[in-house]
Amino acid sequence: EDPPGDACPQRAEVSRQASSCLMQAAEGALSSSEEGSSLDEPTWVSWFCMLRNHEFFCEVDPSFVQDRFNLYGLKELVGPLYGEAMTMILGYAPTEKQLADPTQRVHKVLDTARILYGLIHARYILTAQGLSDMKAKYKAHEFGACPRTLCDKQVVLPVGLSDTHSTSNENPLKLFCPRCQELYDHNVPGGNYIDGAFFGSTYPHLFLQTFREVRPPPPTQRYVPRVFGFKIAKVEEQALQNTAREEWPKRLKNEPVSDWDS
């Protein structure tokens, strides 16, 4: 005898719910090891910040990540894997087995988690706690030194030219020197791309406004080019001025400047 008319749809709905629960459990397992989480396991955030070329990142406080106010607008920027990426960030580091298998879903989620954490990080380092965390890195010279010789190895600060994440790698991280006030490329070993939006365009300037005691004095030395010991800077400048005068069209003698002069 056939079951009542509404029994099959009801059974199908239960099956869909069970399947959904299994998928959620599997996705949640991506952020923990096969033997379950333990106190010895590194968190995902600690693992991410310890990756090669990620030395500039600081560990965002979990309470900041869990506050929805701090995440406003990020879901639309990150996309459909936002929920899984957030679960990963708040969980544990992926296992070596998961990372070794390119077919694992963890790889797709990991790429989204990287972008999401970077955008959260850009907001966190503008807070009092975030600025303090980055100050410790600044004092430890973790950001490197200015490549300009006359800046005398002044510590630089990471900065982005845009606050919007670039999907085509057009917003690479830059380095700002507080002494000469210039920008420099961040030559990452291996060519790994770090988006400037993960640090933002405001951070270094807010940092220097907040911690005025670390602001260096402007450079006192300036390189002067010489030829056989003679300065050429003023000569070059005068030559440019003369060239500009020669290029300007000359007015014939006794020619009126305009119709009003005639």
Image (cartoon, rainbow, N blue to C red):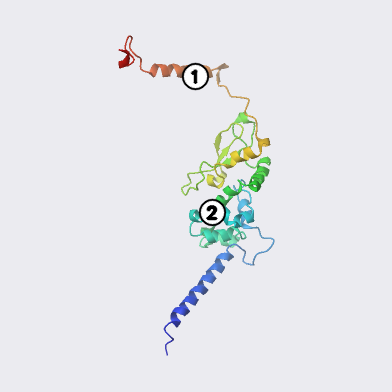
Name which residue lies at 44% across and 81% down: 8
- Front position among marks 1 and 2: 2
- Whether residue 144 can be seen here: no
Question: In the drawing, does residue 250 fall left or right of residue 119?
Answer: left
175 in relation to 36, above or below: above
- Whether residue 238 can be seen here: yes
Name which residue lies at 59% across and 57% down: 89
Farthest bottom residue in view: 1
Badge 1 element = helix
Q: Position of residue 125 (x, y in %)?
A: 61, 46
Say the numbered circle drawn on residue 190.
none
Q: Position of residue 100 (x, y in %)?
A: 56, 60
Picture quadrant where residue 215 is located: top right
Residue wearing tag 2: 72
Q: Position of residue 114 (x, y in %)?
A: 55, 53
Q: Residues within 10 Å of mark 2 (few under 14, many from 20)?
A: few
155 in relation to 78, above or below: above
Q: Residues within 10 Å of mark 1 (few under 14, many from 20)?
A: few
Quadrant (top left, top right, bottom left, bottom right) of the N terminus: bottom left
Residue type of the residue flagged with mark 2 = Tyr
Residue wearing tag 1: 237
